[in-house]
């Protein structure tokens, strides 16, 4: 199953997105990497690297980010992992992307399909 | 020639500067960014200074890599991956070194600036760290090529870095949070360029202290 890593400056946003997505797809492999190790606002390369490793499989991993250093820190975390070809940062709204990705991955969709769904979340009409 | 002790001293001095200028850097960042640059840099270098005593028996490359690794997990903002990449990349060209020639120092700075360009996908003139770092390195290279000592070269480097900081007041930010402000970013100096100017100041002071 494709894993999902939620990278936010806020631990609460990352945990919250995971919690919300698990409500719809309890079996989804989601890891929250929000905030610094002590819970302060920020992004932490070591924390993101651990999160990726916790949901990493041959099926791949998608990373959703909030903004700014979340992107650069995620890029560095990917570089820390030797076999990283299937670890992809996707430009997607963080909460909607986590939910859509959770649903898509648990029905067994391949990495490419999950990425496509995450990208499409950007144009999803709420009403 | 820079010894390992001087490199460690440089990192310590820079850490002290980040503590000393914490509020100032944060104020600059409040004007055009998310207002945490000083807080973040100080937090990162505080973690570095706690780590330094354990690095004394390492080679210079391992010291710089350890500094970089610490920064990327403790700074929290964009300056973490940027400064972290710079220190790690600088380390990669100094493999196994216990002391540095002038050329090694220049190579380390060049590799560092290359790392920042790569990580930030930025070029000079976008109101970033690069606007003080690139002129500083150019000035150092020029000074060394004219036969000056590294201390004299670093003095020229610091001067060029501060001129670069002044230049950032005149341009629009197109990278990072400040880019959301567009023209309103004019008139404000870039916090990242400022913290980078302090890095050259710290390097100069470390070189001066060693009396070379």
Image (cartoon, coloured by chain):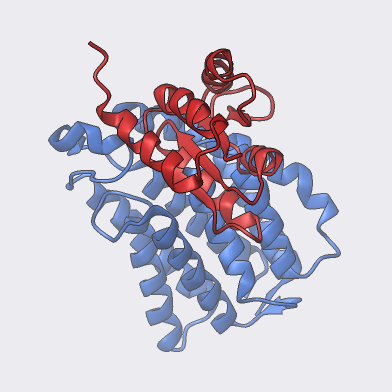
Chain colours: A red, B blue
Q: Who is closer to the viewer here, B45 or A13?
A: A13
Describe residue A67's horizontal placement relative to residue B48 as left or right. left
| Residue found at x 65% / y 76% | B94
Residue at the front extreme of this rendering: A107
Task: Count how many numbered circles sit on residues in the image.
Answer: 0
Describe residue A69's horizontal placement relative to residue B11 as left or right. left
Image quadrant in which you'd find residue B203: bottom right
Residue A102 x/y as whole percent:
52, 27
| Residue found at x 40% / y 45% | B192
Residue B18 x/y as whole percent:
55, 41
Quarter in which the N terminus of chain B is drawn: bottom right
Residue B37 versus residue B212 in the image, above or below: above
Q: Who is closer to the viewer here, A29 or A109?
A: A109
Residue A74 x/y as whole percent:
52, 44
Quarter in which the C terminus of chain B is drawn: bottom right
Image quadrant in which you'd find residue A115: top left
| Residue found at x 37% / y 73% | B139
Task: Examine the rendering and report whether any part of residue B149 can be seen.
Answer: yes
Q: Who is closer to the viewer here, A83 or B65?
A: A83
Residue A20 x/y as whole percent:
53, 14
Task: Examine the rendering and report whether any part of residue A43 can be seen.
Answer: no
Describe residue B131's horizontal placement relative to residue A25 as left or right. left
Q: Who is closer to the viewer here, B102 or B62?
A: B62
């Amino acid at each position: 199953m494709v894993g999902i890593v939620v990278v936010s400056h806020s631990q609460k946003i990352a945990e919250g997105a995971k919690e919300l997505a698990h409500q719809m797809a309890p079996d989804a492999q989601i890891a929250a990497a929000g905030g610094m190790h002590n819970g302060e606002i920020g992004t932490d390369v070591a924390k993101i690297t651990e999160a990726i490793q916790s949901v990493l499989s041959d099926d791949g991993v998608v990373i959703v980010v909030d903004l700014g250093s979340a992107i650069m820190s995620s890029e560095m975390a990917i570089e820390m992992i030797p076999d990283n070809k299937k670890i992809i940062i996707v430009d997607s709204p963080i909460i909607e992307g986590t939910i859509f990705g959770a649903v898509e991955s648990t029905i067994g969709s391949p990495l490419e399909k999950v990425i496509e769904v995450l990208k499409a979340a950007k144009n999803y009409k709420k009403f | 020639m820079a010894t390992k002790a001087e490199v460690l001293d440089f990192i310590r001095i820079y850490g002290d500067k980040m503590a000393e200028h914490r509020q100032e850097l944060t104020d600059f960042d409040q004007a055009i960014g998310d207002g945490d640059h000083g807080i973040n840099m100080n937090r990162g270098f505080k973690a570095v200074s706690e780590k330094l005593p354990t690095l004394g028996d390492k080679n210079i490359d391992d010291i710089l890599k350890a500094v970089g690794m610490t920064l990327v997990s403790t700074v929290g903002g964009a300056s973490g991956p940027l400064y972290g990449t710079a220190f790690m990349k600088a380390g990669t060209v100094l493999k196994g070194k216990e002391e540095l020639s002038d050329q090694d120092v220049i190579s380390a700075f060049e590799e560092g600036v290359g790392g920042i360009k790569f990580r930030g996908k930025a070029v000079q003139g976008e109101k970033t760290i690069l606007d003080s770092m690139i002129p500083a390195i150019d000035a150092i290279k020029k000074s060394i090529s004219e036969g000056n000592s590294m201390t004299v070269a670093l003095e020229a480097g610091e001067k060029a870095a501060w001129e670069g900081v002044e230049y950032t007041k005149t341009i629009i930010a197109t990278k990072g949070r400040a880019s959301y402000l567009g023209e309103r970013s004019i008139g404000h100096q870039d916090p990242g360029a400022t913290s980078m100017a302090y890095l050259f100041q710290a390097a100069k002071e470390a070189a001066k202290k060693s009396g070379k």
